[in-house]
Image: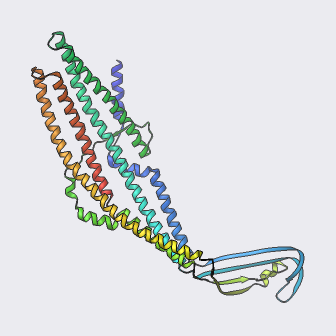
Amino acid sequence: MKKIWTMFFLVGSLAFAREITLEEAIQESMNHSKTLKISEKKLQISKLNRSQAIKKALPSIVYNTSYQRTEYERNISKNKSSMQLEKGGYKQSITISQPIFQGGAIIAGIQGAKAYETIADLSYVQEGLNTRLKTIRTFSNIVNSKRNLQALENSEKQLQKRYQKQEAQLELRLITKTDLLKTKYNLLEIQSLIAKAKSNIEVQTEDLKFQMGIDKEEQLEVKEFNVPNHLTDTIDFQKDKEKALESSIQSLIAKSQVEIAKAQETAALGNMLPKINAFASYGVATERTKWKQTREDAEWMGGLSVSWNVFSFGSDYDNYQIAKLEKENKELSETIAQDRIELTLKTAYSELQRLEILRESRKRGLEAAELNFSMDQEKFDSGLISTIDYLLSETQLREARVNYYQTELDYYYAFEYYRSLLV
C-alpha cells in the first residue's frame, strides 16, 4: 500500500509540474535577472548624464536675495538718489546667463556623455547575452543530467535482472560467487551514480528557478530540445569576422572609449582657454535700507563676463598632457581589442568545428556500443564470454551514451556562444 501511495504521489507531482521550454526559460531569466536590471539602471543614468551635458549649453536663470546686518552703521542706499546710515540692508536680483565660449568644454562634455551612453547601452545588451548563455548552460545541464539518469537507470534495470539470474545460476553452481560479486559491485556503483545524478538535477533545477525568479518550491520540468546537425554550414566565417571587427559589442565599446578619451583631451585643452558668458540681470546692484525699495529701484543690467586662469604653474597644461596620453593609450587598446576579437572568434569557431566532428564520432561510437552490447548479451547468456567482459561491455555502452549526450549539448552551447560574439 505504501508503494502505491508513493507512486501516486510521484505521478501527481509530475502531472502538476510546470513544463518549460528553453526559450521560455531564457525569456523569464531575462525578465527577472537582477544584474540585467542593474545594467538597465546604469543605462538610464547615462541618458540623464547626456541630458545634463546638453543642458549646460543652455541659458540658466538664477535668483539671488540677501539681507546683511553689521555691528556698526554704514551708508546704505535709501533709494536711487539718497543714502542713510543703517546697520542692515537688502538686495535681490534675477540673472539670466548664457555660455558663449567655454573653450570647447561643453561640446566635449556632450561628446563624452554620448560615448558613455553608448557604452552603457552596449553593456546592457552584453548582460542580456550573458544571461541568455547562462540560462542555456543551466538548462542544458539539467537536460544532460536527466539523460544520464535515464541511462543509469536502464543500466541498473539490466544489471538487476542479470544479478537475479546469476543468483539462480549460483545456486545451480553454474557460476562462481566471484562472478556474482562483480555484478553486485557494478550495480552498487551505478546506484551511487544515480544518487549523484538526482542530486545534480535538484541543484541545477534550483539554480534555474533562481535565474527565472520563481519559487523554489514550485515543481518544474524542463522540456528536452533538439540540436540541429551541421550548424557550421550556416556560418560564413570571413563575413562574421568582418562584422565582429566592425560592429560587435566589444569593438564598439573600444571605439567609444577612444571617443571618451578624445572628449577629455578637448576638455583639458579648454581649461587653458578663457571662458565667456553673456548675462542679463534685473534687480539692484547695491543694498537698500528697505525690502520694498529693492523692487522699486530694480533695473535691467547686462553684459559679458570673462574669466581666464592665466597662470597655475603649468597644472592645466599637465592635465592636458595626461589627457593626450590617455587618448593614445585608448587608441592602442582599441587595436589590441580588435586582435582579441579576431582571436576569440576564431577560437570559438574552431571549437564549434571540433565539437561538430566529435558529436558525429560519438554518435557512431554509441551505435557501435549498442550493437556490441546486444551481441555480448547473447554471448554471455551462451557462456562464451566472462562476467568481466560483459560488465565491461555494459560500462562502455553507458559511457558512450553519457559522452554523446554531453557532446551534443556542448556543441549547441558552443554555437550559441559563437553567435553571441557577433552581436
204 left or right of 78 in image: left
Q: Nearer the viewer, residue 279 or 13?
A: 279
Whole-percent x, y for residue 176 in the image: 18, 14
Please tell me in which quadrant of the rendered image residue 392 appears: top left
Residue 252, percent from left and from top: 38, 66
Residue drawn at the location 27% of the way across and 58% of the way down: 346
Q: Is residue 110 above or below residue 341?
A: below
Asked whether 146 or 395 is in front, the reply is 395
User: Image height check: is 237 above or below 353?
Assistant: below
Name the residue at 86% across, 84% down: 78
Q: Please identify the quadrant where the N terminus is shown.
A: top left
In this view, 5 is above or below 81: above
Question: Is residue 394 rendered to the left or right of residue 278?
Answer: left
Between residue 32 and residue 184, name the one nearer to us.
Answer: 184
Q: Residue placed at 70% from the left, 79% from the top?
A: 94
Q: How is the image coloured?
A: rainbow
Q: Give the vertical position of 6 relative to 173 (above or below).
A: below
Name the foreground residue: 334 vs 275. Answer: 334
* Residue 234 rendering spot, x and y as whole percentages: 21, 58
Q: Please tell me which residue is depicted at 21% across the width and 21% down the height of the picture.
A: 161
Q: In the image as oriented, which residue stretches furthest toward the top? A: 172
